[in-house]
Amino acid sequence: MAETLAIMERAYRGALEKQFFDALYLAVELHRQLGGMDLLLRGPAVSYAVAVAHVGSIEVGGRKVDTLSDPRRDLIRLQESGVAVWVEESDLAEFGVDGPAALLPGVRAAAPGEMARRWPDYRTVCFL
Amino acid sequence: MSASGVTDTAPGHLLVASRGPWSGPGAARFLADAAALAETGVPVTVVLLGDGTPLAVAGGTVELVTLLDAGGEVWVDRFGAAQRGIAEIALPEGARWVDMDDVAARLLDPDVRAVWH
Amino acid sequence: MGRTIPPTDVLITLMGAPHADDTTTSAVRLVQAMLRQGARVQVWTCGYATMLTQRALGESKPRNLADWSVDYPSTTALVAELLNAFPDSLFWYGCRFCSDDRGAGEHLPGVVLRAPAKYADNVAAAGKTLLLGVI
C-alpha cells in the first residue's frame, strides 16, 4: 500500500523551460523517497496517459531542441518504478480521450469520488 | 468497523480550499472529493482560504452545499474574506468564520490529516 | 556526514510560485500562527518559492514612487523576521536543484539548501507534511 496519493490536475506547465524536470520527474523521486506513491490524473492531466500523443522538437535560433517535456515517457517510467496510475473517467471525454482503451496499459479509470473515499488510507494526500 | 464501513479510528481531515472557480474546475472537484469523503463518515473540515472564500457567497456554491449536506464542516477565513470585501456576508447554514489560529490549531492536532488545494 | 533534521510537528512544503496568488501570504500566516501556538515547524521550498529567501532581494522591495518614505520589506527580510523570532522552533530549507534551476543564487543565512534526494529525511522528521501549490 503506497503511503502517498498525488493528484495532478494542472498539466503542460512549460515544455521548453522545464524539459526533464517536470512534476512527473518529481513524482518518481517522491515515490522512491516517501514509501510509495499512487498517482491520480484529473482534468487536463488525463491526457498524460493517452497512448498516442507525441512530443516534437522545436527550433530555437540555430539549435534544435528535442528535450521538451514528454509526459507519456515520464508516466511510463513512473509505472515501471511501481507507481499505480489512475485517471478520473469523468474527465476523459472533455479532453478527447476515447475511453479507457485509449490509455497507456496499466492505467486505470476511477469513478467520481472513488479515490477521495480512499484518502484516509494514505499518510499524505497532495496535489502535485 | 462502523456500519458505514469507516473504522472508528478514521482520522479527521482538514481540507484547505484556497482556489476558486476562476482558478479552474479543480476547485469544485476538490469540494466534491470532500463531500465523497464526508459521506463515508470521516470527519471533514473544509477551510475556504484566499480565492476559496467567495465560494461561500450567496448561500454557497452547489458543491459547498452538497458538502454541508454530507456532514462536512465549512470554515471561512475572515482575513481572506475581508481582503475580498465579503467579511460581512451571511454564511451558508453550517459554515462559520475562523481565523488562522483556528486553522493552525486544527492542523496541529496529531489525529488530523491535511490536504491543501 | 548527513545533517540531522530537527523534529517538528509540521513540514510545510511550499511549491507554488510567489507573485501568482495568496499562497505565500497564507503560508506565512499559517506558519506564524503555528509557531505562536508553540509548535515546531519546517518549511521546505521548491520551484520558484525558493526565490523567497534570495539575498539578492535585500531587505526591502524597490522604492514606491507614490510613497517614497515607506519601507516595504522583502520576502527575504520577512523570513529573517520569522527565523529571528522563533530561532528554536522554525527551520527553513530550500531545494538546491530548484534554487539552481531558477538562478536563485545565494540565500539568507539560516536557510539550508538540500538536495532533492534528502527531502525524505525532512518528511520523516515531521509529524505531518502539507504541500502548498504546485511547481
Image (cartoon, coloured by chain):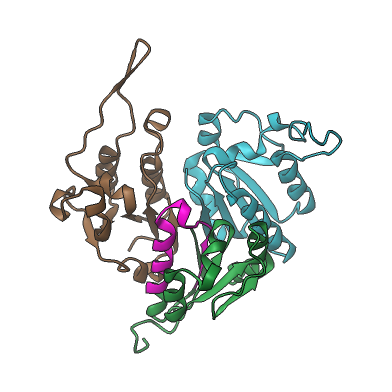
Left or right side of A90 for B20: right
Relative image position of residue A57 (x, y in whole percent): 28, 23
Q: Colour of chain A?
A: brown
Relative image position of residue C122 (x, y in whole percent): 55, 51
Is B40 a magenta residue?
A: no
Location of residue C60 with respect to B101 vertically, above or below: above
Residue lying furthest front: B58
Is B31 a magenta residue?
A: yes
Q: Quadrant of residue A2?
A: bottom left
The magenta stretch is B13-36
Q: Colour of chain B?
A: green
Relative image position of residue B65 (x, y in whole percent): 45, 75
Q: Is residue C114 visible?
A: no
Q: Nearer the viewer, residue C53 or B33?
A: B33
Residue lying furthest bottom: B3
Left or right side of B63 for B103: right
Q: Nearer the viewer, residue B95 or A83?
A: B95
* Residue shown at 43% from the left, 84% from the top: B8
* Residue shown at 67% from the left, 57% from the top: B83
Location of residue C49 with respect to A64 vertically, above or below: below
Residue lying furthest right: C69
Q: Colour of chain C?
A: cyan
Relative image position of residue B46 (x, y in whole percent): 52, 69
